[in-house]
Amino acid sequence: MSEPAIVAEHLTYRYGDLLAVDHISFTVERGEILGFLGPNGAGKSTTVKMLTGQLRPASGRALLLGIDVARSPKRVQARIGVCFEQPNLYEELSGIDNLHLFARLFNVRDLDVDALLRRVGLDGRGRDLVGRYSKGMKQRLMIARALVHRPDILFLDEPTEGLDPTSAEAIRRVILEEQQRGATIFLTTHDMYEADRLCQRVAFINNGKIVALDTPYNLKQQYGKRMVRAELMGPDGAIYTREIVLDRPETPAEMADLLAHERVMTLHTEEATLEDIFIRLTGRSLV
Amino acid sequence: MSVAAIWALIQKDARLYAANRLFALVTVLGLVAYIVIYFLLPATVDETLHLGVVTPTLPSALAEALTDDAVQVTYFDTADQLRAAVAAGDVTVGFAFPPDLYDQIRQGQQPTVELLLAPEVTPDLVTVYEAVGRELSFALIGQALPVTISEVVLGTDLAGAQIAPRQRMLPLFAVLVLMVECLGLASLIAAEVEQGTIRALLVTPLTMRGLFVAKSLFGSLFAFGQAVVLMAITGGLAHAALLNLTALLLGSVLMTGVAFLIAALGRDLMSVMGWGMLALLILALPSFNILVPGLAAEWVQLIPTHYLVDTIYRSLNFGAGWSEVGVNLAPLAGSALLLLALGMVILQRRFA
């Protein structure tokens, strides 16, 4: 069995007196998509910076593809692609020029820039100056830039935030394609739907600590409440709702009572969302 | 450190520089303007002193005293006419003797001789002209001092070989060309920090050292290239070309170090311009010292550009070579490398 793509061991970082990341440990297997979820200031960006060699941990260590990031950051950076949250492209250059520049930095000589642009839905716009791109187009170009050297690990920081549905869907498609290629993806996001749909596992980080790390299914099983929500019509014609929590001994009787004595208008099963679970675990909202 | 990566960064910076309309325009127009101004400035110096005199008579002794190629004497009938000529700039210095000069002397009175000066006469020369007026008065009444003045010029005699204004300006133009590139480079780097593109570069195999090598090469060679164009067109490389090229190259490295410091201090284009103007004022000071000799004190030699300016000025105008001004290159190189290293260290903290 190959070694994990990412191993974080007691990673810690301080900004002065503030403990931004507090001895966090986790692993990400090769080919896995890990969602890294947490509110602003939770320590997500600092963790990503330590994993990508932009910050040196105060203590602990990070191994990417078996290489110690703090000791050999450039060896690691040659094999990872990073897509930042804020667009940081050369806006006075064209999309193609941006990609060619980074291809040369990664010593890529056979870049098929047209194919790459096509993958992110920017075919035909490569020669335009990036300054004329929309936010969604810039984000897609950032993804393309992170892919020029076919990295083993992709770090994506809020890749779909604030994008139109078409751009967001294009980026999600590329993420899944990269996973199929064999890349490991470290996805930082606020979007619970996106994390639920794309990630094999999600990690919740709060106040610099990982408070939960598991598959979305297991987290829902472990922390969520499955229930049935019914919309009922009362004797006066008013609509009201009734919720019945599943998986309890009295649930069958309550369900029978509902169906026998109430006028049921709609009936839905509901499960807890990752957002609900995060709030339950931390007492804070993700956004 | 990959040569291909460094070359890619240099090409990228050149494109970004060209894409910045302000700096592209300032670079091209500045270079053209300096060259045009150079050729519009006088190539020679008019050393003739235009003297105006109002005197009741012109004794032969006075006429002989005023016979000199360097002095052009114009005689006026009245003091009012002389005043008008000085005010109009036709005459630099005027001596108006009273019409009754001899009567006043015979009566034992002390006549007043009016000394009229054009605005450009410097204060230190006023007392000289006062002495000249007294001497002329003695000559008029036939009492010339029984002494002979022997002229000895120690050092280079510049009589008839004054340094033309354009030659005095050339070192200033060279510093300005380098400084414009310095501001452009500082602005580029500040924009890269502000837009976060530096972060994107540094999560690639590109090392911090490689990044600085690329920036240093781009800044130094771009500035050097323009300075060479300026000097070549204005004939600044006609004498001691290798010496001047070496000085300009070191000056370009110096300005690149200054650009790193400005970029480390500036947060945006406006603050880069603010710090840049301060740096420009300080670094151009040695050039002003050449334009107006005696303007600045000895401490100007603490400004690194003094060694660049002094080398160019003396080699161009006094034929100085390696033996005379080569010694300037050591402090110039030392300060260039020091500023470059300092700029890198401080700027690196902004990149982190």
Image (spheres, coloured by chain):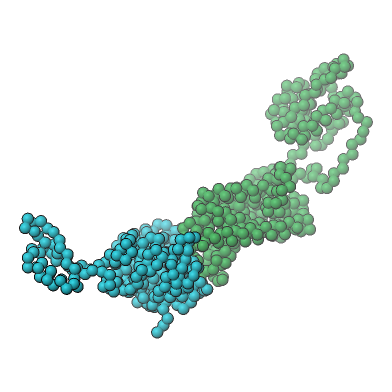
Q: Residue at image x 72%, y 45%?
A: B297
Residue A92 on image: x %, y %: 46, 58
Residue B294 on image: x %, y %: 74, 43
Which chain appears green?
B
Q: For the N terminus of chain A, which image quadrant?
A: bottom left
- Nearer to the camera, A236 or B125: A236
Can residue B48 be seen here? The reply is yes
Q: Quadrant of residue A178?
A: bottom left
Q: Is residue A78 above or below residue B102?
A: below
Which chain appears cyan?
A
Q: Residue at image x 38%, y 69%?
A: A210
Residue B193 on image: x %, y %: 50, 58
- The answer to whether residue B158 is left or right of residue A170 is right
Q: Is residue B103 above or below residue B287?
A: above
Q: Is residue A99 above or below residue B186?
A: below
Q: Quadrant of residue A251?
A: bottom left
- The answer to whether residue B61 is left or right of residue B215 is right
Q: Residue at image x 85%, y 17%?
A: B109
Residue A131 on image: x %, y %: 42, 57
Q: For the C terminus of chain A, which image quadrant?
A: bottom left
- Nearer to the camera, A279 or A250: A250
**Which residue extends farthest right?**
B146
**Which residue extends farthest bottom?**
A1
Q: Is residue B32 above or below residue B102?
A: below
- The answer to whether residue B175 is left or right of residue B69 is left
Can residue B233 be seen here? The reply is no
